[in-house]
Amino acid sequence: MPIHYGSIIAEVKHTRSNVSVFDICHMGEIIVTEKITDNSFNNILTVDVLNIKINKCKYGYLLKEDGGILDDLIVYRLNENKWMIVVNAGTAANDYEIIKSGLNKKAKIENISEQTAKLDLQGPQSLNIINKIFNGDFNSLEYFSFINHKYKNKQCIISRTGYTGELGYEIYIDVNQCKELWEEILSYEIVKPAGLGARDILRLEMGYPLYGSDIDRNITPLNVNKNNIIKKEADFIGKKALTEMQITDKVLIGFEMESRRAPKNHNKIFINDIEIGYVTSGCFSPHLNMGIGLGYIKKEYENIQNIHIDFGTSKEKAAIVKPPFLKNTSLKN
Amino acid sequence: MNIKENYYYTKEHEWAQINNNKAKIGITDYAQSKLGDITYVEVIDKGKNIKQFEILTTIESVKSASEIYSPITGIVSLFNNKLETNPELINQSCYEEGFIAELENINKDEIKNLMDHNAYREYLKGLE
């Protein structure tokens, strides 16, 4: 996936006003098949996979025994006994091994990342394009739902999900059909290609964390205030550590700069002269005309508002805000 | 790549337009195209003394943050304050509306350390 196809800012704006297509083929896809009575898959991830309805998907984590996040992922329930786990590219191979080692012998697991392409169509106009290309009526497809569909007589999955905060669809398709679909999508004049640079700004404007930048194996779901999405009943790797954990040392925050400066990974966060944390992601938001960022601060400071970001040569004012930074998008239209 | 005649250029892709003892300063078309969408230019204080090839300001684009060096010694007499709210002017018009600053009391002897438009064009060819 290229960083951009011309102008990153133009791509960000086009996604929020019209529709863009993103080549996300690098993501990993893992299929798990297991009879629900065997029930080993539900003891691995923080998502209650048995409680996902068929044709729905859920966001969750694969943790280490100590509660550190090995990956954030989305689990799709394909049928009663079959799930697809969509994972980050860099972590896919390790995720596969860990999930495999947690499954009992009757369960089947397959890494289909090499055969699976993924194109994301994102933006308020994405529904019109999806309806035209797949010759169907996707109006009733709800957020975090998907359907199996055919493209040129081959199966694909169309999922009402995304990483931009706009109405959008993620299409999982056979790798051999990807080029044809990409070209068909771009044959509609309103659709423009967008790259990794735009994707990063779009996700940051929504305050979505990025694995490897904002979350990693040294961060737990408590640090990112996501304890509410962790299942309560069934077991999962890291459950013991997580239930015993009471107070977290640091918490993820979002903040807005007073200026247009883009905070950078590792910039330090101050309150007056006291260093209280560090930045993990930042960018200039073209829709808010200001710098925005995510970072960690010591938990004892989580209720303060005014902070400073240290750019090395100067410290600049910022205010802690609760993401999403950008409200009223087309996400749930 | 747009290169202006009668401007002088640095290897770091800044330009200077000399007019008596004053110089207008900015970055070249090559520089703005490499930086991509420019989102922030650090304000330069009027009256600041700056030496040739010293850091004049910092420019941020969606891709990176870059230090901008002064092509010539002088005193900052004007910062283009339109850049505070519209830094994209550098992308749109790097030699005119998107200039960065004006210097006065410049040291004209230092022009010999800069490239003219022909030399800069040749220099760019070597970078391709």
Image: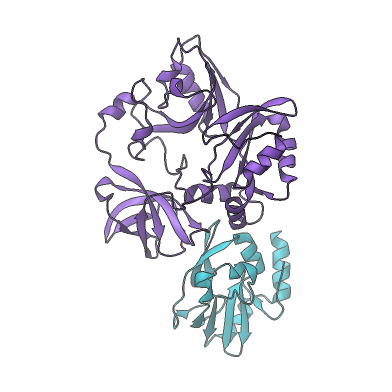
Chain colours: A purple, B cyan
Left or right side of A235 for A291: right
Quadrant of the drawing holding the N terminus of chain A: top right
Examine the rendering and report whether any part of residue A114 can be seen.
Answer: no
The percent position of residue A117, horizontal first and vertical second, equals 65, 32
* Viewer-side residue, B2 vs B108: B2
Horizontal relation, residue A114 to residue A232: left or right: right
- Labels in figure, total: 0
- Residue A221 in picture, x, y percent from top left: 36, 35
Between A93 and A198, which is closer to the camera in this rendering?
A198
Identify whether B97 is placed above or below A154: below
Q: Quadrant of residue A168?
A: top right
Residue B104 as seen in the image, left or right of residue A119: left
Image height of B55 relative to A125, above or below: below
**Residue found 44% across the figure and 47% down from its top:** A207
Judge left or right: residue A223 versus residue A88.
left
Q: Residue at x 52, y 36 (%)?
A: A143
Where in the figure is residue A229, as x and y percent of width and height?
A: 38, 32
A42 vs A291: above or below: above
The answer, for residue B46, to whether it is visible in the render is yes
The residue shown at (28%, 49%) is: A302
Q: Residue furthest bottom?
A: B20
Please tell me which residue lies in front, A147 or B9: A147
Q: Which quadrant of the view contains residue B114?
A: bottom right
Q: Is residue A229 above or below residue A333?
A: above
Residue A204 horizontal/vertical position (percent): 48, 49
